[in-house]
């Protein structure tokens, strides 16, 4: 498998790694960027770590890198805004383009795309931050009951997510989630938390081995459990029936293609006790921190972290030369 996705190119590249910005996930972005920068430097590439701020465009124009690696999470780095800037500057970059990034970042829009491709998603209600909450709560309880999952439409890293597995104060939970903007409300599904990475090179579109995420009893993969070492366990490969594993990998690749993504993505799922699969969302710039899932999946595919980063920047650079 490794031979299939390795590159023999030894060209030294000048790479600009974008980090931070004003996203609620800026600190996670800086951790991802630091790991990417360290790997690029170890590989012998010329890597520059650049903060996403008002000076960033001028810095990029002066630097004129061969490739930009946007190690960014959340808007504006993951929603197509930064991708549009890089397109205007004529700079090659790792990851999906403007359209794919924008589609994937909005959970409701992404689900409509998945639904049109017959991928398994749950029903949902969209709640605007300006909605009348009392009326909204009544509507949701009539549709789904009080056991729901509430997710801000445009955040990642589980920021703002409210889970009510046993019901509870839906009004308070909605009010908390809406601090992060418009929200998606879905029926709560009990099941294994599963993720599948996709690696999309110039010659291959490959699904990573399936990963199951385990947390302590009565906990879930929230912000703390994602980024605190030892707080979650990544089971690679997941303990699932072979046919379930195959279907998860198929759906991850199908979702990646449906959104028109490139280079890399990570699809998140729930698998219930009867092996029903629910596709939750797709991340276009998965985390690259020491506790992140995408590098684990790539490692199981045969690519250590340095080889993964090398492949991603070379794929982006090769795209710019054709």
Image: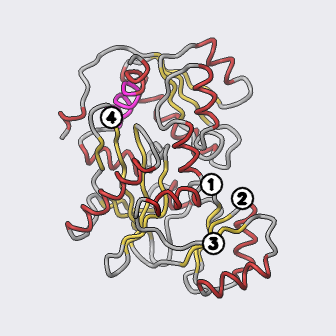
Q: Please, what secondary structure does the residue beneath circle 4 have?
A: loop
Q: Which mark is residue 321?
A: none
Label whose residue precedes the other's in the sequence (2 or 1): 1
How many neighbours does mark 4 have within 10 angstroms: few (below 14), some (14-19), or many (20 or more)? some
Horizontal and vertical percent position of residue 41: 43, 22
Q: Are marks 2 and 1 in contact (CB under 8 Å)?
A: yes
| Residue 173 part of the magenta-drawn span | no
- Tell me: 14 left or right of 182: left
Query: Could you give the CA–CA distance between mark 3 and mark 1, rounded to whole angstroms?
Result: 17 Å
Instruction: Compare residues 207 and 168 and report the one nearer the observer.
Output: 207
Q: What's the CA distance linking mark 1 and mark 4?
A: 27 Å
Q: Which residues are magenta?
A: 305-315
Q: Nearer the viewer, mark 3 or mark 1?
A: 3
Tag 1 residue? 155
Q: Which residue is mark 4?
A: 201
Q: Are the residues tagged 4 and 2 within 8 Å (C-beta)?
A: no
Nearer to us: label 1 or label 4 = 4
Mark earlier in primary sequence (3, 4): 3
Q: Report the front residue among 322 and 299.
A: 322
Q: Nearer the viewer, mark 3 or mark 2?
A: 3
Residue with the mark numbered 2? 180
View extreme (front): residue: 116
> Does residue 269 lie above or below 190 as drawn?
above
């Amino acid at each position: 498998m490794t031979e299939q996705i390795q590159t023999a190119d030894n060209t030294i590249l000048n790479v600009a790694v974008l980090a931070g910005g004003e996203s609620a996930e800026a600190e996670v972005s800086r951790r991802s960027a630091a790991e990417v920068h360290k790997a690029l430097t170890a590989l012998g590439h010329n890597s520059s770590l650049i903060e996403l701020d008002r000076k960033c465009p001028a810095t990029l124009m002066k630097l004129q890198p061969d490739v930009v690696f946007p190690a960014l999470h959340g808007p504006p780095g993951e929603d197509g805004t930064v991708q549009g800037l890089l397109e205007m500057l004529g700079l090659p970059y790792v990851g999906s383009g403007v359209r794919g990034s924008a589609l994937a970042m909005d959970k409701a829009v992404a689900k409509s795309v998945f639904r049109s491709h017959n991928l398994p998603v749950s029903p949902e209600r969209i709640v605007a931050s300006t909605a009348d909450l009392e009326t909204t709560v009544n509507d949701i309880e009539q549709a789904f009951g009080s056991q729901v999952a509430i997710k801000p439409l445009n955040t990642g890293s589980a920021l703002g997510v409210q889970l009510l597995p046993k019901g509870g104060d839906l009004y308070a939970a909605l009010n908390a989630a809406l601090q992060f903007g418009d929200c998606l409300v879905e029926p709560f599904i009990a099941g294994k938390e599963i993720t599948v990475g996709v690696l999309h090179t110039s010659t291959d579109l490959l699904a990573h081995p399936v990963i199951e995420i385990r947390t302590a009893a009565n906990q879930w993969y929230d912000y703390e459990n994602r980024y605190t070492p030892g707080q979650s366990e990544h089971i690679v490969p997941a303990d699932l029936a072979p046919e379930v594993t195959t279907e998860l990998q198929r759906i991850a690749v199908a979702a990646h293609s449906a959104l028109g993504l490139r280079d890399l993505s990570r699809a998140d799922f729930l698998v219930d006790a009867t092996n029903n699969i629910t596709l939750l969302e797709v991340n276009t710039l998965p985390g690259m921190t020491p506790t992140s899932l995408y590098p684990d999946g790539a490692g199981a595919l045969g690519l250590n972290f340095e080889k993964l980063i090398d492949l991603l920047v070379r794929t982006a650079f090769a795209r710019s030369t054709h």
